[in-house]
Image (spheres, grey):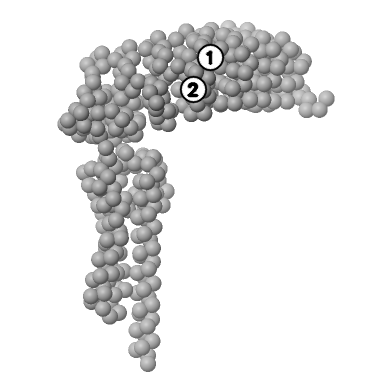
Amino acid sequence: MANSYPLADLHPVHAEPNDKKCPELQLLEHAISNCAVPLVHQLIQQHPKVVFEKGWHGQTPLHKACLVGDWSIVFLLLEAGSDANALNEFDETPLHYACKRGVGSVVHLLIQRGANLEAVDKNGMGVSHHAAQTGSIFVFHLLNELGVNFTTVDRNLQTPLHIACKHGHVETFKFLVKKGRSNILQADKDGNNALHIAAIEGHSYLCWIIMSMTTCSTLHVFNRCGLTPRKLAEQRDSFGHQEIIPVMKYYETVKRDARPGGPISLWWGHFYVPGLYYALLIFFAALIGGWYQGFIVAAGMAFLILNLIKHTHRMIVRQPKTKHCKLCEQVLRLHGSPLFVFTQVYSQKQPFSLLLVHYRCSYLLCSCSYSLCTYIVQMCIKTKHSGK
């Protein structure tokens, strides 16, 4: 037989204590974990009833395959008669696992084979709750087209929006609040709304988005323990908490009906600073005249670079930086400002801010190169005239 595997040569997966898996089920689960599609096909052909066996916590091979996210294996198991609505010990179906894995093609296949979209587990979590754990936008679009309700709550009175905030899925959050799919101010059984949960987990960028979508009054909402989002953030000590706490402190002093926003004028000021600085250098060099022009411009650019180096202490590092990223950050932090923390928080994933950084870095490098070339050319011309 082509693509035949010697089953006896496979290393069986060690079963957990008190687990009564049959050897065929162990081999099948091992093959599913390694995405060995031909071996799965061979095992199903040799032992057709193995697809109905249940292993640890009542999981069927289809549960395992959905959690792995391999469409081909899921298709083989369904073709062999696996139940798309089989329950494990926690009343979780394969569709729950597929939504949790976030593979839209697998979710679509299960729905085509009769998977129940309204099934909930013992914690009251439905398909949208499980999908929010990984935050696959494709899966949410599919569930939305199928009419899934995103306002349902589990036993903790949490909606998919709360779970997305807990895991820091920004794009999922934006999708859920768009067109009124979820209530951004809805609280769970502990009285925590979306901002409370994001502050607890230290998702600073998500906190900023929530604040900008609501008003400053959200910062003054107390949960059942009498804590505001800032107080919850102060109980943790990660980088995200340290980044968002000063922002929350500032906006707590602003009027409650005010809507937080980024310092747009400051951004445009930073955008034009290199050009204005270089224009001034050219202007003063032109006033002085002579072969000193190139030297003056080169000296001015050298002063600019030294000024950058002095501001390296303002750098906020989220992840290991490459040399290019460090230079870009130094350029962006050239003119330090007390409002920069808001710029840093707001510009984490803003394309315009990224363009601004690269623009300033490129402009600086081009200006330095142009200045040095001009100085060298003028020195060569002077030397040539001196020789004559």
Pick whichever of labels 2 and 1 is earlier in the sequence.
Answer: 1
Position of residue 82 in the picture relative to residue 382 (left or right): right
**Picture coordinates of residue 12 (x, y %)?**
67, 19
- 333 shown above or below 116: below
Q: Residue at point 26% right, 13% down? A: 224
- 245 shown above or below 388: above
Q: Residues within 10 Å of mark 2 (few under 14, many from 20)?
A: some
Q: Which residue is mark 2?
A: 144
Please tell me which residue lies in front, 99 or 386.
Answer: 99
- 308 shown above or below 133: below
* Amino acid at pointer 1: Leu
- In this orientation, does residue 47 appear? yes
Quarter of the image where one finds residue 320: top left
In what quadrant of the picture does the C terminus appear? bottom left
Please tell me which residue lies in front, 370 or 178.
Answer: 178
Q: Residues within 10 Å of mark 1 (few under 14, many from 20)?
A: some
In what quadrant of the picture does the N terminus appear? top right
What residue occupies the far bottom of the structure in this picture? 388
What residue occupies the far right of the structure in this picture? 1
Q: Residue at point 39% right, 49% down? A: 355
* Amino acid at pointer 2: Asn
Q: Residue at point 31% right, 30% down? A: 213
**Picture coordinates of residue 151 (x, y %)?**
40, 16
**Picture coordinates of residue 232 (x, y %)?**
27, 23
Label 2: which secondary element:
helix
Q: Which residue is mark 1?
A: 117
Q: Residue at point 36% right, 85% down? A: 383
Quarter of the image where one finds residue 66: top right
**Picture coordinates of residue 227 (x, y %)?**
23, 19
- In this orientation, does residue 12 appear? no
- 249 shown above or below 144: below
Label 1: which secondary element:
loop
